[in-house]
């Protein structure tokens, strides 16, 4: 954009309504000598922030000009107007009022804009002192981007908002590593890790950042771009040079105030490069202000259950396939009562652990809180009153905080104190499990002094804005009390003055009033003003302004008292600002401890919520060890179970799943479910195969995140990688072959699954022709069994696959039990040993309400096909012989044969039969049924 040193074309009449109203000049009739902001200043600032919308502060508005105005008006649906001219053209303009700025910012950020917020850096009165044409100093104080938000109104209380820097190192191929450094500047949560390039998609979806920064070339990589999109992150390219590992190391040491990073584990060059870019971008957007930075958590692939991106989506861990939280696993297990607790739960769910001992420590805590209902209830009550300390501290650190953020810390300390007392009380005699012990000591880590100060200093419910004052309690500072006393006394004097003037002038409607421009003045209706305009009263009352219906005056006394009020109010305000700064500093000095305390509150909320869930939903404690067991007895699907309950649509049928190699000394009983590492699950559509598969994966995730599980019992050998895929028909609407996607993903599984992994494949191969699909499914099962040796559940509608159970030692068949009843099908949702005898597709179609004529016709075609040579499933020849559907009237079913069977059934009265007679009747029925079919 071209600079323009000329007089500005941008004008705003009410430009700078004096921020401190009471200091407005009194002696003129004109509007305040508003300073016209110069176009040069605007253009210069805009030129420095070309990729952002510029929110340009003018008085009580943020205004946008030129292209910014056009874009913002469109995005926000607000009026686009024009203001002045630039190079002979109208200047498009739109504006948002300060008090609604957050709301508009949020909408712009959601739509992918970045916003530079340009503030007035001095009081307009200051500028005026430099001459009437002087420009109020302004500059950008902050860039608002999706990954650098701090306001509660811009953030989701229950979701973390990471800014993640991504750096790819190595030469590509299998060796390539991707380093990720993530910081939530709204809380200071910080994590750094490196994964093999193949695991990048799962990692980026796990982190789900608000914004990703990376070098141009990496972002240009279609695959990387696609996964960033899927993770719903905004992508911001940054210069490759900012990924500088030396600078990263230096910045990190400075920010953590350490001379050596060893205490946080060894960082790779790639990780430090990512950290470097991250911290640099934070400086850039925060214009040098320092957000809180907690000690980095190291997240390597070795200490977590690795879940790739498609598995995360397919299991609907944090979001359902349609994108909401509500019906996801997180949505149904969340019993937390605070935002930070909900974030902790989401973090645990997206990063289940892999160390049986660490998991056991979490389970101990949940178990303790489950067993101690009183403690659980009381702690949750205290937690409900705990504000989001981490976010409040972050705003304070970035000098964006208000009195409510100070109060948040105070109330958080209060809640922490209450929780510590509860935990100590519960511990007496029996002690606490380690995790709770650690939480208790973090909650007590700081604070009684700080809390006492905050309690004494702040009123109970302070106002939101620091600049208005009025948040410091009376009695906290003598000088403040004195200034406020003077101010209030003078106000009383002012009130007395009004009474005196009323008396002296006998004008009943005389009033002393105040506005921002004139300050205090005497007002009388126009028709009563005359006496004041002539002597002797005119000696006292000097005319200031004539309005439509009123005339305004000032007096010496008025000015004198006003200046006393202004002076004492200003003094009071200044003292409050002092107090604010002192309290902020006291909080900043304890940032590390308070961060720990905030984390402990979140953890306690999370543990208590999991205990609450276990109590409500009758979950049990899983047993985790380093075996390769997977033995779930009476398992349930956490989401479907609660949905059924909520809809009062019956109870969920529980099922066993035992994926263990059978021991020679303990052969499975024939009526028990099979024991084998790989289960082939067959059964008609709607029988519950997918539900069964998924519930076992979800139970594994819950167990390894340290939650109790929906089962009668669960014994799980720690899983290193979890895979879940659902085969799908081609999704042409989205312009890609999902069969291709399915195969790519299946390849990923076969290449990555180890013998510690768990694999769930639901109808893989469905997206292609029957024989192709069957052959692929066949080969995949063989490969999983022979090469991967993982635990696997494989649902299929290819009955042909069930012969594999006989050929492969560690493969067993199970099927979903169904009953046929008068040609209808009833789903029992119960897993039983064996294979489904057929697919019941036509019965299911009937249930779905396909027209009778169609299902009947389908039954005929099926009969023919089944008679045909199995090697020609197309049955072309046979089908050629079938009379055409349209040419044949739809015949009624052969009622007579059905009646014969029904007749026979009706004649049976089981209660009166001997076992022998019953057996005979059964043979008779079978005979009749066989006749029916031919
Ligand atoms: P499939 O994959 O065999 O076609 P689904 O797993 O999709 O079947 O299940 C179909 C429906 O049956 C589900 O929507 C669910 O409501 C119900 N269902 C499945 N399993 C159970 C169960 N164990 N108990 C109760 N209802 C179930
Ligand atoms: Mg299914």
Image (cartoon, rainbow, N blue to C red):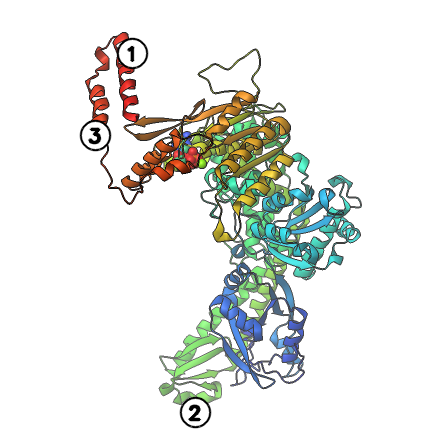
Task: Please name the residue shown 65% across and 68% down the image.
Answer: 49
**Percent position of residue 555, x then y:** 50, 82
Q: Would residue 289 be seen by someone viewing this image from the given angle?
A: no
Crowd band around label 1 with a 10 angstrom C-alpha radius: few (<14), some (14–19), many (20+): few
Query: Which one is in front in this view, the residue at disc 2 or the one at disc 3?
Result: 3
Query: Which one is in front in this view, the residue at disc 3 or the one at disc 1?
Result: 3
Mark 2 C-beta to ligand 1 under 8 Å = no
Horizontal side of 394 relative to 562 (left or right) equals: right
In which of the image's four quarters is ligand 1 placed? top left
Task: Please name the residue shown 35% across and 31% down the image.
Answer: 863
Quadrant the N terminus occupies: bottom right
| Figure quadrant of residue 362 | top right
Task: State the separation of the CA atoms marked 2 and 3.
Answer: 115 Å
- Secondary-structure class at tag 2: loop
Quadrant the C terminus occupies: top left
Q: Which mark is residue 46?
A: none
Task: State the separation of the CA atoms marked 3 and 1.
Answer: 26 Å
**Residue annotated with mark 2:** 534
Contact between marks 2 and 3 (CB within 8 A): the answer is no
Q: Would residue 446 be seen by someone viewing this image from the given angle?
A: yes
Query: Which one is in front in this view, the residue at disc 2 or the one at disc 1?
Result: 1
Mark 3 C-beta to ligand 1 under 8 Å = no
Crowd band around label 2 with a 10 angstrom C-alpha radius: few (<14), some (14–19), many (20+): few
**Residue annotated with mark 1:** 919
**Residue annotated with mark 3:** 895
Q: Earlier in the sequence, mark 3 or mark 1?
A: 3
């Amino acid at each position: 954009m071209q600079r323009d040193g000329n007089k500005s074309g941008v004008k705003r009449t009410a430009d700078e309504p004096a921020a401190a109203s009471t200091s407005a000049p009194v002696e003129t009739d004109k509007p305040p000598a508003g300073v016209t902001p110069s176009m040069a200043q605007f253009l210069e600032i805009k030129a420095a922030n070309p990729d952002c919308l510029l929110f340009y502060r003018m008085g009580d508005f943020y205004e946008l000009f030129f292209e910014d105005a056009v874009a913002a008006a469109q995005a926000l649906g607000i009026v686009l107007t024009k203001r002045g001219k630039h190079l002979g053209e109208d200047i498009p303009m739109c504006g948002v009022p300060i008090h609604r700025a957050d709301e508009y910012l949020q909408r712009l950020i959601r739509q992918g804009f970045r916003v530079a917020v340009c503030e007035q850096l001095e009081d307009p009165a200051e500028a005026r002192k430099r001459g009437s044409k002087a420009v109020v100093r302004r500059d950008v104080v902050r860039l608002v981007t999706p990954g650098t938000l701090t306001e509660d109104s811009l953030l989701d209380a229950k979701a973390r908002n990471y800014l993640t820097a991504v750096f790819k190192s190595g030469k590509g191929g299998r060796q390539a590593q991707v380093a990720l450094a993530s910081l939530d500047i709204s809380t200071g949560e910080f994590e750094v890790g490196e994964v093999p390039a193949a695991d990048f998609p799962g990692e980026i979806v796990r982190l789900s950042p608000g914004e990703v920064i990376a070098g141009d070339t990496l972002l240009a990589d279609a695959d990387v771009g696609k996964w960033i999109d899927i993770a719903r992150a905004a992508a911001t390219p940054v210069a490759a040079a900012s990924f500088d590992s030396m600078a990263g190391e230096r910045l990190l040491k400075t920010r953590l105030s350490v001379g050596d990073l060893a205490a946080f584990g060894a960082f790779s060059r790639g990780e430090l490069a990512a950290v470097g870019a991250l911290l640099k971008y934070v400086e850039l957007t925060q214009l040098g202000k320092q957000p809180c930075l907690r000690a980095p958590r190291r997240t390597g692939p070795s200490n977590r259950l690795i879940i790739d991106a498609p598995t995360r989506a397919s299991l609907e861990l944090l979001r359902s396939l349609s994108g909401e939280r509500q019906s996801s696993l997180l949505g149904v297990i969340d019993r937390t009562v605070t935002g930070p607790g909900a974030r902790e739960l989401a973090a645990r769910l997206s990063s289940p652990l892999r160390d049986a001992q660490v998991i056991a420590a979490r389970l101990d805590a949940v178990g303790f809180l489950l067993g101690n209902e009183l403690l659980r209830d009381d702690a949750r009550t205290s937690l409900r009153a705990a504000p989001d300390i981490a976010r409040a501290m972050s705003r304070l650190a970035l000098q964006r905080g208000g009195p409510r953020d100070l109060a948040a810390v105070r109330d958080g300390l209060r809640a922490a104190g209450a929780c510590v007392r509860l935990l100590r009380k519960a511990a007496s005699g029996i002690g606490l499990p380690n995790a709770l012990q650690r939480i208790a000591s973090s909650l007590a880590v700081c604070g009684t002094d700080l809390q006492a100060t905050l309690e004494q200093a702040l009123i109970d419910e302070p106002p939101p804005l620091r600049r208005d004052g009025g948040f410091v309690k009376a009695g906290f500072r003598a000088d403040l009390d004195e200034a406020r006393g003077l101010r209030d006394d003078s106000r009383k004097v002012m009130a007395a003055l009004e009474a005196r003037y009323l008396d002296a002038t006998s004008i009943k409607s005389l009033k002393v009033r105040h506005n921002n421009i004139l300050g205090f003045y005497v007002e009388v209706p126009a028709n009563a003003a005359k006496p004041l305009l002539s002597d002797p009263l005119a000696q006292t009352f000097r005319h200031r302004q004539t309005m439509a219906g009123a005339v305004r005056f000032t007096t010496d006394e008025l000015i004198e008292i006003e200046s006393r009020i202004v002076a004492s109010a200003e003094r009071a305000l200044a003292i409050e600002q002092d107090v604010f700064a002192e309290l902020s500093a006291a909080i900043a000095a304890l940032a590390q401890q308070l961060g720990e305390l905030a984390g402990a509150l979140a953890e306690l909320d999370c543990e208590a919520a999991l205990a609450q869930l276990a109590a409500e939903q009758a979950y049990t404690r899983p047993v985790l060890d380093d075996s390769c067991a997977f033995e779930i007895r009476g398992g349930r699907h956490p989401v479907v179970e609660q949905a059924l309950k909520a809809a009062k649509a019956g109870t969920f049928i529980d099922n066993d799943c035992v994926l263990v190699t059978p021991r020679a000394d303990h052969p499975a009983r024939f009526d028990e479910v099979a024991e084998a590492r790989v289960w082939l699950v067959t059964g008609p559509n709607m029988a519950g195969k997918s539900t069964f598969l998924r519930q076992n994966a979800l139970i594994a995730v819950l167990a390894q995140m340290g939650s109790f599980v929906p089962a009668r019992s669960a014994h799980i050998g720690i899983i290193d990688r979890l895979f879940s895929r659902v085969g799908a028909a081609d999704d042409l609407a989205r312009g890609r072959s999902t069969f291709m996607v399915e195969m790519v993903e299946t390849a990923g599984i076969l290449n990555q699954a180890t013998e510690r992994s768990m694999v769930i494949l639901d109808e893989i191969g469905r997206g292609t022709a029957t024989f192709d699909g069957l052959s692929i499914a066949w080969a995949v099962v063989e490969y999983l069994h022979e090469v991967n040796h993982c635990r696997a559940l494989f649902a299929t509608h290819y009955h042909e696959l069930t012969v594999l159970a006989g050929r492969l030692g560690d493969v067993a068949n199970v099927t979903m039990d169904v009953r046929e009843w008068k040609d209808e099908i009833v789903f029992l949702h119960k897993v039983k040993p064996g294979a489904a005898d057929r697919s019941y597709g036509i019965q299911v179609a009937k249930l779905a309400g396909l027209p009778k004529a169609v299902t009947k016709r389908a039954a005929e075609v099926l009969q023919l096909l089944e008679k045909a040579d199995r090697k020609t499933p197309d049955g072309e020849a046979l089908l050629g012989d079938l009379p055409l559907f349209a040419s044949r009237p739809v015949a009624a079913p052969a009622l007579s044969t059905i009646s014969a069977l029904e007749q026979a059934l009706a004649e049976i009265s089981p209660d009166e039969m001997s076992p022998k007679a019953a057996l005979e009747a059964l043979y008779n029925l079978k005979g009749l049924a066989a006749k029916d079919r031919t």
